[in-house]
Amino acid sequence: MEKELNAGNLVVRLPVNTAISSVRPQVRLEELRSKRRVVAIWGSKHQLESSRVLNTLCVLRRRLIQSQTLVVLIPTDETCKADLGLDSYQIGDALWLGEPCNTDEWDKYFGELVENPTNELVWFAINFKGRSIASGLSEGPRLFELLGQQLQPMEILDTSDEAELLEGENMSIAKQILEKQQQFYKLLTNSDDAIKMQAVYSGESADEINEVCFVYKACSLLLHLVHYYISQTLNRSYWEEEELIIGPNV
């Protein structure tokens, strides 16, 4: 509780629609309660890049805006947005990206947040009430899980919304991904053709998917063992009761 209260005193500069105003107000996190959720990530440029969190944030920027989530990146080294590659080409209108003020206070807070201070990446997420909903050490936040479980959209996700396609050499790749996505949902909802569905999937291995599959198989095995134990116990109890009633030689 004390850590949550202390987090409310941290100051951030809010993003604004530059077409309306260029003035970016500074507010404490406690002033954002009931208005914005917050994900704060503290780490060096290398940690932010190696964890792939930057790329994921940029890819999911529209979902972050729809969930009214403000992301605050607090570099532990002398790094600016340009050094991180966060230009308008990647971050769009940047209405999801806040800027930490009084970085010494942020550093102090994260230093106290970790019991044994290290040089590892640290992050936390808070909800509309200013309560902690997730945190992590060493690895960046699993944004897909957060958006699905804790940071659900507050605005309607309309299927008619056009996708944002990056200009330049990545345009063709983006179009291929969107075509695969549309093909996947079409097969998922209007077909039972397993062969065509398999063609949509990538042959490359993904650590997060492998982890989910491992947990699923482990849970399935555990359920089978529990079922077998229960069935054996009930079966043995039944015959023991029969012997008591009618005798063992009947």
Image (spheres, rainbow, N blue to C red):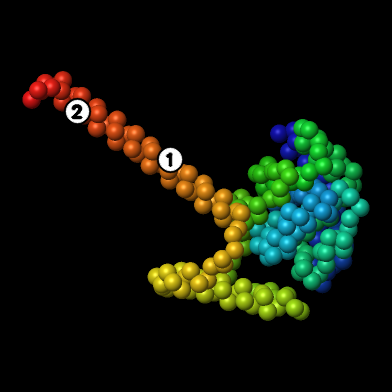
- Indicate which disc residue 153 carries: none
Mark 2 burial class by Cα count in 10 Å: few <14, some 14-19, many 20+: few
Residue at left offset 47%, top offset 48%: 217
Q: Quadrant of the N terminus?
A: top right
Q: Nearer the viewer, residue 118 or 164?
A: 118
Q: Earlier in the sequence, mark 2 or mark 1?
A: 1
Q: How many marks?
A: 2
Amino acid at circle 1: Leu
Q: CA distance from mark 2 to mark 1?
A: 26 Å
Seen from this angle, which residue lies furthest left? Answer: 250
Where is residue 49? Give x, y as percent: 78, 57
Q: Quadrant of the C terminus?
A: top left
Say what secondary structure mark 1 lies in: helix
Q: Nearer the viewer, residue 65 or 86?
A: 86
Q: Is residue 207 left or right of residue 245?
A: right
> From where the camera sits, is residue 110 visible?
yes
Where is residue 196? Give x, y as percent: 46, 73
Residue at left offset 15%, top offset 26%: 242
Q: Nearer the viewer, residue 18 or 50?
A: 50
Where is residue 171? Give x, y as percent: 70, 78
Amino acid at circle 2: Trp
Say what secondary structure mark 2 lies in: helix
Residue linked to disc 1: 222
Where is residue 92? Give x, y as percent: 76, 69
Q: Nearer the viewer, residue 98 or 208?
A: 208
Residue at left offset 84%, top offset 60%: 84
The image quadrant that residue 164 belongs to is bottom right
Residue at left offset 47%, top offset 70%: 197
Residue linked to disc 2: 239
Q: Is 32 above or below relative to 67?
A: above
